[in-house]
Amino acid sequence: MAWNSRVDHVAPFRVMHLLEMAQAREAAGHDVIHLEVGEPDFATPAPIVAAGQQALAEGKTRYTPAAGLASLREAIAGHYAEHFNAKVDPARILVTPGASGALLLASQLLVECGDRVLMADPNYPCNRHFMALAGAEIDTVPVGRDSGWQLTAPLIERHWQAKTRLAMLASPSNPTGHTLDAEALTKVIDTVAAKGGDVIVDEIYQGLNYDDAPLSATSLSEDAFVVNSFSKYFGMTGWRLGWLVAPEQAVEPLTRLAQNVFLAAPTPSQHAALAAFTPECRDILETRRATLKQRRQVLLDGLAELGLAPDLPPQGAFYLWLDISRYSRDSQAFCERLLVEENVAITPGIDFAVQGGEHHVRIAFTNDVARLQEAVVRIARFVSRL
């Protein structure tokens, strides 16, 4: 059987192998601490659940317009106005099945076969794969402490080529948790615009910021394509709901794509998400953000004693990106051994980094403080044997 050769550019998500191993060990009676999963361990906030239940009870299960409920698009625009001082026309917002739906639309709209796309290395692998499936060539740019673990304007200047079509950023980023401030993000947008390209900004961890106020590219430019999600900050991973803010002239072709690719985002999820912007829900979410900030510090303090603290503490998201080179140059083997010997599940860096992934790992602080402290004890015991 033959299939599209572009599929060969989609690498397996290796963390899923670790997850299967961890689940098998749990089934065999082992006490596994999960620090590999990229989703909050909190349940969806009660006001959102109640709104979803009400929508189902009232029979709100038919298709919505392809761009989403007008009321939800207006609520998202209000969110930008209230928290980011950004004036976003609701007509520029498309509600999608998860942020993945937004990335699919943007990649299909912006990329021709043979175009080149700039991304930071490390980055979220699915972003690379979406662009590769659209026919793009991916140019990953190694980043580190000097660039704040982000793709900056000077790096874009250095790596832009004749066929480069766009730059893709993430702030806060997965796997490093680092952000771009307003000045740096503005310079990126201006640099790319001067070259006739486009910018996609992945903001799905927006709101999960621990040191500075969250920032959105929507407050800086009407020309950037901004991807966001109800999964991470809002705790709605399984509801499969996200959105895309697009330049005005891109809305019509994006809507045509949405009509043909997925018709519309899940209707009950859209009605449920309206409750995400209420003061009651906001209080719950901010309490959870404070909890994640505390967890971050617990891990930073504990891992520092093992020589595993990141060179720059993450400013957002819920991950630590750790250099394990003093212990191993094979992150897959390191993670598998840690799981088998100490029942701690973490993610190998080769999922995220084209260069350097073999000596990095990602740890998610999506577990309670007691479990994180126990994980540090187990990791310390493990590395003492290496």
Image (spheres, grey):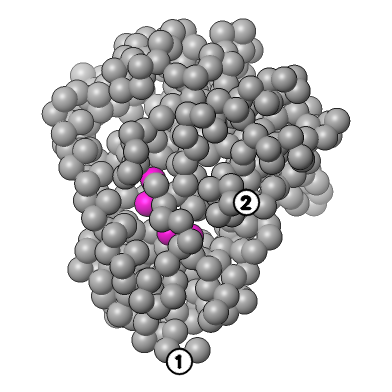
View extreme (left): residue? 280
- Most foreground residue, 152 or 232: 152
Q: Which residue is mark 2?
A: 143
Q: Position of residue 150 (x, y in %)?
A: 57, 44
Q: Amino acid at mark 1?
A: Arg
- Most foreground residue, 32 or 158: 158
Q: Quadrant of residue 377?
A: bottom left
- Most foreground residue, 101 or 323: 323
Q: Position of residue 283 (x, y in %)?
A: 16, 34
| Element on which disc 1 rests | loop
State yes or no: residue 188 in magenta: no
| Element on which disc 2 rests | loop
Q: Which residue is mark 1?
A: 385
Is 227 left or right of 282, judged from the image as shown? right
Q: Is residue 165 visible?
A: yes
Q: Residue at x 74, y 35 (%)?
A: 157
Q: From mark 2 to mark 1, how far is it between C-alphas?
A: 31 Å
Q: Quadrant of residue 229?
A: top left
Q: Position of residue 13 (x, y in %)?
A: 57, 57
What is the magenta range? 316-321
